Image (tube, rainbow, N blue to C red):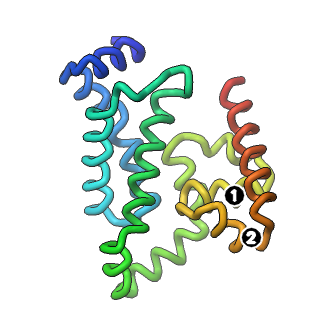
Amino acid sequence: MQQDGLILELQNGNQRAFERIYELYSESTYGIIYSIVHDEKIAEEILQDVFLKIWNNSSSYNSDKGRFFTWILNIARNASIDQLRSKRHKNNQKNLTADNFVDILESKSNFSAKADAIGVQKYIDVLKPVCKKLIDLLFFKGFTQKETAEELEMPLGTVKTKNRACINKLREMLVE
């Protein structure tokens, strides 16, 4: 079944189409979730929630607004960031083990592995260093634009403008 037909079947409530979409996208989706939350168990829970949202909200997908995979990744990213910002997660992080600290230190330099998990590493490699840093903070680490501005010691308006320019550059490369 072609992707457009598969999406249409999903939107019509076809369970087999949903199962096929899960087969096609669950591994990549799990990769992006895990790269944000750094916890297998939590990532698996979020993955279930994401695919439940895909099933329940499939009618909200509009191909004119973007690719289906991008829609899925946005759901996964938002769910992951919501989890990180939740009170429960913050309380659990208060008693981190030494292993978690090592993971946090390693993950700061592990941007390329995260980008490669969703297949955009070759495009990100040609971006300017500021774009790489913005994408890492905003999309992979879940920073808000305000937090990114503080981290990079940049005005908020500059972060917004540079982020838009970086995303447009990525978009141009993906269309080519």
Is residue 172 left or right of 145 when viewed as pictured?
Answer: right
The quadrant of the rendering that contains the N terminus is top left
Q: Which residue is mark 1?
A: 134
| Amino acid type of the residue that numbered disc 1 sits on in the rendered structure | Leu
Is residue 70 left or right of 175 when viewed as pictured?
Answer: left
Above or below, 128 against 25 in this view is: below
Tag on residue 152? 2
Q: Secondary structure at mark 1?
A: helix
Q: Residue 116 in the image: x percent, y percent?
A: 55, 47
Q: Residue 69 in the image: x percent, y percent?
A: 46, 32
| Residue 92 vs residue 24, the one in the foreground | 92
Instruction: Give the class, few, some or many, for how many residues have Cα within 10 Å of label 2's Cα (few <14, many ≥20).
Output: some
Above or below, 99 against 172 in this view is: below
Mark 2 or 1, nearer chain start = 1
Distance (Cα) linking label 2 and label 1: 9 Å
Quadrant in which residue 37 is drawn: bottom left
The quadrant of the rendering that contains the C terminus is top right
How many marks overall? 2
| Residue 91 vs residue 22, the one in the foreground | 91
| Residue 112 vs residue 63, the one in the foreground | 63
Residue drawn at x 40%, y 17% as measured from the top left: 3
| Amino acid type of the residue that numbered disc 2 sits on in the rendered structure | Leu
Tag on residue 119? none
Residue drawn at x 73%, y 54% as measured from the top left: 160
Residue drawn at x 61%, y 58% as measured from the top left: 138
Instruction: Give the class, few, some or many, for how many residues have Cα within 10 Å of label 1's Cα (few <14, many ≥20).
Output: many
Q: Residue 34 in the image: x percent, y percent?
A: 40, 57
Is residue 155 left or right of 27 when viewed as pictured?
Answer: right
Q: Secondary structure at mark 2?
A: helix
Contact (CB < 8 A) between labels 2 and 1?
Answer: yes
Quadrant in which residue 38 is drawn: bottom left
